[in-house]
Amino acid sequence: MTTHDSPPCPLCLATDSTVFANYGDRVYHRCPHCLLTFLAPECLPDAETERAEYLTHFNHPDDPGYRHLLSHLVEPLLRHLAPGAQGLDYGCGPGPGATLSVMLAEQGFPMAAYDPFFAPDAAVLQARYDFITCGETAEHFHLPARDMDRFDTLLKPDGWLGLMTHWLIDDADFAGWRYRRELSHVCFYKPETLRWIAERYGWGLEFPARNVALFHKPAVAG
């Protein structure tokens, strides 16, 4: 039975998670199946708090340091894209410009952008795309099962999903991990978690750089 002490895993929906860590008003659970570490539902930030947190982020397309960070996702993704491939930047964040969209548009790839707070155009989610970028976004997902299902629907066959998020490698470092301490970071993925996602959806998976996963949705057979 699901109880307050064992909330459903927001990724694989299993109901036998256990408390992984407890830091005052922030309780984290670990799923034994997909190995997702997640903030307890009662500890999640509300929408107003979450939006205010995002507005403190100053990630500008003209910032060379931020572009360098995102290049670890963009450069390996580019090797898989056909000329003119159409992409979606999912979780683009506040303006003045979605940096991933800008970087890929500079390479000749038309981009759409979606963000539930800052670019909430539902029409964008009615199209299908050759590739999707999700950079420094998956750690914010309150219900990653919903978002992964959405990616599977939005991606065309033979499409690519580029996901960047800091992996949880050493559990012993979790308490002092800067990434954990950010208010809006609520889900933490091990490489094994990403492999679980690939197996769940029948996607290929490669790890071209630390904290970067490229998923490939196979082409329809025949």
Image (tube, rainbow, N blue to C red):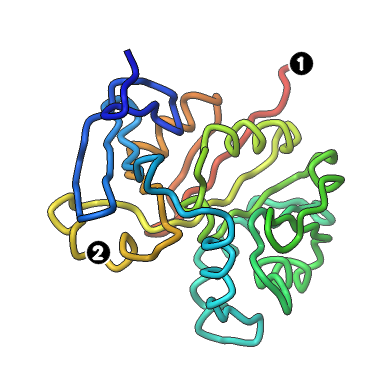
Judging by the rendered image, the residue that carries numbered circle 1 is: 222
Judging by the rendered image, the residue that carries numbered circle 2 is: 177
Q: Name the spot of residue 214 as percent of width and height, x first.
A: 53, 47
Which element type, helix, strand or loop, lies under badge 1?
loop
Numbered circles on residues, count: 2
* Image-quadrant location for residue 117: bottom right
The extreme top residue here reads: 1
Q: Name the spot of residue 209 as percent of width and height, x first.
A: 42, 59
Alpha carbon separation for disc pair 2 and 1: 47 Å
**Image mark for residue 100:** none
Question: Pointer 1: residues within 10 angstroms few (<14), some, or many (20+)?
Answer: few
When the figure is inspected, residue 121 is found, relative to residue 145, above or below; the finding is below
**Residue at image coords 46%, 54%:** 45
Position of 182 with respect to 72 (left or right) is left
**Residue at image coords 76%, 44%:** 130
What amino acid is found at the position of numbered circle 1 in the picture? Gly
What amino acid is found at the position of numbered circle 2 in the picture? Trp
Position of 173 with respect to 40 (left or right) is left
Q: Name the spot of residue 203 as percent of width and height, x first.
A: 55, 31
When the figure is inspected, residue 148 is found, relative to residue 96, above or below; the finding is above
Disc 2 or 1, which lies upstream in sequence?
Answer: 2
Quarter containing the N terminus: top left
